[in-house]
Amino acid sequence: MHNGAKIGVAAVTAAMFAGGGYAAYSLVAGDDAGSSAPKAAQSPKVLAVVAELPSAEVAAQGASAFLAAWAKGDYEEAGRHTDKPAAAIVALAKFRDTLTPTSLALTPGGPTAANLANSSASPSASGVPTGAGVPLSFHAKVELKGAASAWQYDGAVAMVKLNDGRAVVHWEPSVVHPKLDGTKVLAVQPISASASQVVDRKGRPLTEFPSVQAVLEQIRFKDEGTTASGGTGVVVTQAGGSGTPERLFTITEPKDGAKKPLTLDADLQRVAEAVAKGQSGPASVVAIEPSTGQILALANNPAQGPNRAFGATIAPGSTMKVITAAALLEAGLTPDSPLPCPKTTNVSGRAVPNDFLDERLGNTFKDDFAQSCNTAFLEAGQAKLKPGTLPALSKDVFGLGLVWQTGLPTFDTKVPLESNPAETAMAYIGQGRIQTNSLAMASVAATVQSGTFRQPILVPGTAQPRAARSLDRTVLGQLQSMMRRTVQSGTASGALGGIPGAAAKTGTAEVNGQSAPNSWITAYAGNLAVAVEVQAGGHGATAAGPAAAKLLEVGNKG
């Protein structure tokens, strides 16, 4: 593996920049072997990427040559088969020095899922390709000392064409591993628990669930704090060591072989993974047991990467009307209070509409909640609520804004106290500067279902701080009835109407620069509360609602 380790990085770099223009794409070719012309009479040939794509055959030949050179440790040769030799040589040597593999097998594959016809290597004005080139896959099998099995992963290269007719790899950090993006590095580090040790609340393994595996290294079990248990693994982490590493492969199992239980339920986790993966864009799903606060499922789309379910900082849209409704009920409204729903209402000179076009002037408060009337909530909120009411109620009753310790890092919801009247008003319908995520909004539904805030936890036995107070029983009953009515005859009736005892609030959250709003729902049925959000999913009943229904249909079987 160390053959070819002595490489002329400096010489290659100097040659690249001596070529002028866009250096990373300007290479000086060496003398042709067997040429009879005197060296002094030969002119070096400047190699550059051209706009034309290589043929599939030529692309495959170039990819195979690159992979073969990488596998045998000839990094100078591998670099010659890229458009950025110096960067490639350094990165491949770093891969070797970090992992010290005992063997490396790289098997070329076919085209990736990307459509070859849509691939582009056309240079921009600066000469940098604006597209990826011809995408080809490969399979890596890395044998590491002490590992019980090989680390295997699928990678991809994008092939571009040089003006000498060859196809070479368009070099990016992700060529080495798809998790590398220029800000992250691979490392071998101690690990705290193996995938096989982590089990659900019934002792069942959780190895099949990608959303769980993606956060495994971030979980802190009660019996270990932040101390590892003697195992080692390959992780991807931020350069410089900041942030939480993501485990990619276990080299040696931790010495402590005890099972590490989570509160998750494998049956619900399986459904959550499926509904998250089934969304067209980024999404997150959380399920909570209201009677205990235990988190029964968490899932993200994509499963790998940031934990959107716990860490998103996005507006909740009309799901926030659950808390606004509680505030208005405490302020004296009842579900039967007349509360007209005009087409638009004025907020600091801006006309704010509803998601429907007609006016509904005969509405009551419960109608406005079930139909998600923005204008009625805005007018009632501005008339009856003081600026600090919503932030205080969110924290004191629903626990939003407290510092949560779930066993996994979270973003704690922000419901700011606004000095701007327009921002204060927009918060009543879940817009403005409120930031939250699916974990928090599932907890809101759980609090309504049980009447008591129980801080969500993922690791059994984690302390659960209490909220300052609970809703008055009359107000709680009224809020519960309004959420049930939303399922019976309101915006959630199509998705959740067939689920006994279901109660919900849908939401759509407008996002600047986004073509469609985010789709939201928070709901409960029996001893199960859920929240789903789908980026650019449209109305809450369109994407989030059907996903939540699948979880509620399975239910919490204890």
Image (cartoon, rainbow, N blue to C red):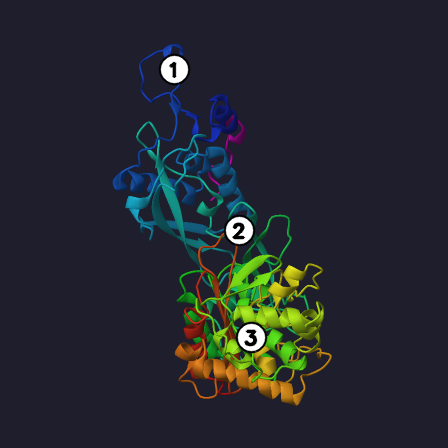
Residue positioned 44% across, 36% down in the render? 79
The amino acid type found where label 2 is placed reads: Leu
| Residue at image mark 3 | 442
Q: Secondary structure at mark 3?
A: helix
- CA distance for labels 2 and 3: 41 Å
**Residue pointed to by mark 2:** 99
- What's the mark number on residue 528? none
Instruction: Kindly tell me whether residue 259 is visible in this rendering.
Output: no
Image height of 114 relative to 77, above or below = below
Q: Is residue 7 magenta?
A: yes
- What are the residue bounds of the magenta stretch? 1-11
On whether residue 14 falls in the magenta region, the answer is no
Looking at the image, is mark 1 or mark 2 nearer the viewer?
1
Alpha carbons under labels 1 and 2: distance apart: 42 Å
Residue furthest to the right = 468
Q: Nearer the viewer, residue 389 or 360?
A: 360
Name the residue beneath numbered marker 1. Answer: 43
Q: Crowding near pointer 1: few (<14 within 10 Å), some, many (20+)?
A: few
Residue 300 locus on image (x, y percent) = 49, 65
SS at mark 1 in the image: loop
Which class describes the residues within 10 Å of circle 3: few (<14), some (14-19), or many (20+)? many
Under circle 2, the secondary element is: helix
